[in-house]
Image (cartoon, rainbow, N blue to C red):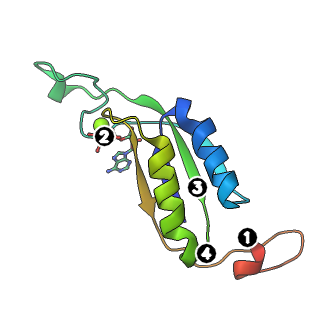
């Protein structure tokens, strides 16, 4: 499972490039978060004592192992602006997956 935290205004670009890859399913959540700058656009005196949480989008995409690198590269390219706060991508194992309607499991369920 690839979990990507991206800028809200990049969702459209990221989503359409994933669609172009043939990615079928994804989960999108509105979240708030901070990274190294603790949510501050600029560092300023005292900022280390406060943390602001900025609006971000969290994408969850479960894919076959062979697709991981392509999906990672696509998300990184389409979520990029070059400014701080562009986001972060995590990869984690998934133990099982089941399509509720059919009972399909594993690859067949994606
Ligand atoms: N270590 C982390 N664990 C969980 N979520 C994180 C982590 N780092 C960043 N995030 C999430 O990603 C969002 C964007 O992080 P951000 O791009 O600011 O990372 P960064 O490490 O500060 O990189 P940059 O210096 O480019 O800003 C955060 O708002 C938060 O939601
Ligand atoms: Mg940051």
Give the mark nearer the N terminus: 1 vs 4.
4
Q: Quadrant of residue 33?
A: top left
**3 or 4: mark nearer the eye:** 4
Does residue 34 appear left or right of residue 25 in this picture? left
Viewport quadrant of the C terminus: bottom right
Label 2 and label 3: CA atoms lie apart by 19 Å
**Residue pictured at 59% horizontal, 39% vertical:** 13
Q: Which label sits on residue 35? A: 2
Provide residue 9's location: percent of width, then percent of height: 54, 29
Give the mark nearer the N terminus: 4 vs 2.
2
**Residue pictured at 54% horizontal, 35% vertical:** 10
Provide residue 26's location: percent of width, then percent of height: 67, 54
The residue indicated by pointer 3 is 60
The residue positioned farthest toward the top in the image shown: 45
Ligand 2 lies in quarter: top left
Please rate how many residues cluster around mark 3, counting C-alpha atoms within 10 Å: few if below 14, some from 14 to 19, many from 20. Answer: some
> Does the residue at mark 3 contact the one at mark 4 (Cβ under 8 Å)?
no
The residue indicated by pointer 4 is 64
The residue indicated by pointer 1 is 110
């Amino acid at each position: 499972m690839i979990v990507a935290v991206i800028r809200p205004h990049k969702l459209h670009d990221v989503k359409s490039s994933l669609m172009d890859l043939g990615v079928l399913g994804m989960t999108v959540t509105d979240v708030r978060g901070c990274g190294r700058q603790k949510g501050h656009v600029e560092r300023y005196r005292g900022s280390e004592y406060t943390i602001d949480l900025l609006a971000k989008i969290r994408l969850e995409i479960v894919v076959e192992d062979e697709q991981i690198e392509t999906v990672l590269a696509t998300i990184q390219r389409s979520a990029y602006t070059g400014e701080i706060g562009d986001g972060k991508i995590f990869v984690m194992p998934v133990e099982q997956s089941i399509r509720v309607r059919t009972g399909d499991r594993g690859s067949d369920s994606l």
